Image (cartoon, grey):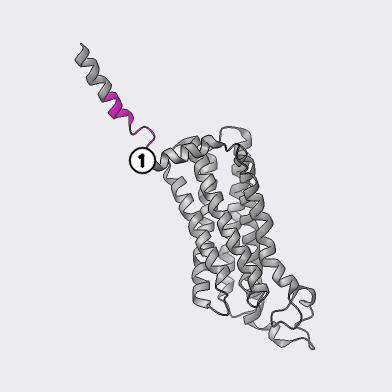
C-alpha cells in the first residue's frame, strides 16, 4: 500500500503552525498585538494601534510583516500542495470503490480550487495586495466548505459497515460546524464593531481547525490505498467521461444479441 495515510495528518500538523506561529512570535513592537501581551495591549498604557479594526487577530493578519510573512507563505504553499494530493487520492479512492461519479468529480474540483485560493492567500498579504488576498480568500473558504460537504455525502453513499456510517456522522457534524462558523465569520467581519470582528476572527480560526480535523478523518480510508488505486485512476483518465457505470452495458448486449442471431 502507498504511504497515503500520512498526508491528512501532515496537513493537520503543518497548517496551524503556519497561521499561529507568526502571531506567537510577534514582538511587542508590532502593531498587531502578540499573544503574550494581547489581553493587556488594549489597556491605558498599551499601544492603541493594536486596538483598531485594522489589527483584529484574523488569519490574514498572522503574517503581514517579515519574517512572519515568509513563514506564513511557505506553510500555505506547502499546505496547498498537500491539499491537491489529498484531493486526488480521495478522488481515486472513491473512483475505485463506486466508479465514475459527478459528486466525486465536483469534490476534486473544489479541493483543487481551494488549494489555488490558499496559495493566493499565503503569497499575497492583506496589507500589501488586499484585492488579490481577498480574491484568494473568497475562493479558498467557500470551496473548502463545498469540499467537506461533498465528501460527507460521498461517505454516506459509500458506507457499507457501521464504522463507515459513524465516519459519515462525524463528517456531517464537522461540516455543520464549518458552515455555521463560516457564516458567522462572514457576517461579523463586515460589521464596524471591535467586539464583533473579534468574534469573526474566532469563528475564522474555528472554521480552519474544523476543516483540518475533517481532513484528518481521511487517514483510515487512505490506509487501504494501493497501487491498484492509481491504476484505476490512470485507466479512468484515458476512458471516455461517463457518470453512468452501466452506460456501456446496453451496447455490449446489442452486440452479443446480434452475434447470437447470426449464429442461429
Which of the pair 197/242 is nearer the observer?
242
Left or right of 7: which side holds 260? Answer: left
In percent of width and height, residue 105 lies at: 44, 47
Which corner quadrant of the image does residue 155 belong to? top right
Q: Who's the residue at 65% across and 47% down the image?
A: 6
Above or below, comparing residue 127 to residue 223 in the picture: below
| Rendered-image quadrant of the C terminus | top left
Q: Who's the residue at 53% across and 77% down the image?
A: 130
Above or below, comparing residue 219 to residue 77 in the picture: above
In percent of width and height, residue 132 lies at: 49, 73
Q: How many marks?
A: 1
In percent of width and height, residue 26 lies at: 73, 76
Magenta segment, which residues? 244-254
Left or right of 182: which side holds 101? Answer: left
Left or right of 178: which side holds 138? Answer: left
Which of the pair 24/168 is nearer the observer?
24
| Rendered-image quadrant of the N terminus | top right
Which of the pair 42/127 is nearer the observer?
127
Residue 75 is inside the magenta segment:
no
Q: Who's the residue at 68% across and 75% down the image?
A: 67
Above or below, comparing residue 180 to residue 186 in the picture: above
Q: Is residue 58 visible?
A: no
Q: Mark 1 highlights which residue?
A: 242
Above or below, comparing residue 120 to residue 130 in the picture: above
User: Can you name the residue that lies furthest to the top here?
Assistant: 264
Using a 10 Å C-alpha cutoff, classify the residue at mark 1 as few (fewer than 14 neighbours), some (14 to 19) or many (20 or more): some
Q: Who's the residue at 76% across and 81% down the image?
A: 28
In percent of width and height, residue 182 lies at: 57, 63
Q: Is residue 258 visible?
A: yes
The secondary structure type at the circle numbered 1 is loop
Amino acid at each position: 500500500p502507498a504511504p497515503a495515510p500520512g498526508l491528512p495528518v501532515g496537513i493537520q500538523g503543518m497548517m496551524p503552525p503556519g497561521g499561529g506561529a507568526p502571531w506567537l512570535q510577534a514582538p511587542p513592537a508590532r502593531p498587531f498585538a502578540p499573544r503574550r501581551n494581547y489581553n493587556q495591549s488594549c489597556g491605558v498604557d498599551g499601544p492603541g494601534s493594536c486596538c483598531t479594526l485594522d489589527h483584529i487577530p484574523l488569519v490574514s493578519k498572522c503574517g503581514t510583516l517579515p519574517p512572519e510573512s515568509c513563514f506564513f507563505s511557505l506553510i500555505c504553499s506547502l499546505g496547498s500542495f498537500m491539499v491537491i494530493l489529498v484531493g486526488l487520492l480521495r478522488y481515486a479512492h472513491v473512483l475505485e470503490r463506486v466508479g465514475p461519479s459527478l459528486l466525486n468529480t465536483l469534490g476534486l474540483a473544489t479541493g483543487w480550487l481551494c488549494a489555488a485560493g490558499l496559495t493566493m492567500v499565503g503569497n499575497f498579504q492583506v496589507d500589501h495586495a488586499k484585492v488579490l488576498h481577498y480574491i484568494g480568500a473568497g475562493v479558498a473558504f467557500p470551496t473548502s466548505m463545498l469540499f467537506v460537504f461533498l465528501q460527507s455525502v460521498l461517505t454516506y453513499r459509500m458506507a457499507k459497515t457501521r464504522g463507515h456510517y459513524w465516519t459519515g456522522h462525524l463528517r456531517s457534524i464537522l461540516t455543520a460546524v464549518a458552515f455555521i462558523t463560516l457564516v458567522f465569520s462572514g457576517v461579523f467581519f463586515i460589521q464596524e464593531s471591535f467586539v464583533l470582528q473579534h468574534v469573526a476572527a474566532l469563528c475564522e480560526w474555528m472554521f480552519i481547525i474544523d476543516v483540518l480535523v475533517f481532513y484528518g478523518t481521511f487517514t483510515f480510508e487512505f490506509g487501504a490505498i494501493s497501487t491498484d488505486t492509481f491504476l484505476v485512476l490512470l485507466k479512468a483518465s484515458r476512458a471516455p467521461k461517463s457518470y453512468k457505470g452501466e452506460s456501456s452495458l446496453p451496447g455490449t448486449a446489442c452486440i452479443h444479441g446480434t452475434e447470437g442471431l447470426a449464429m442461429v
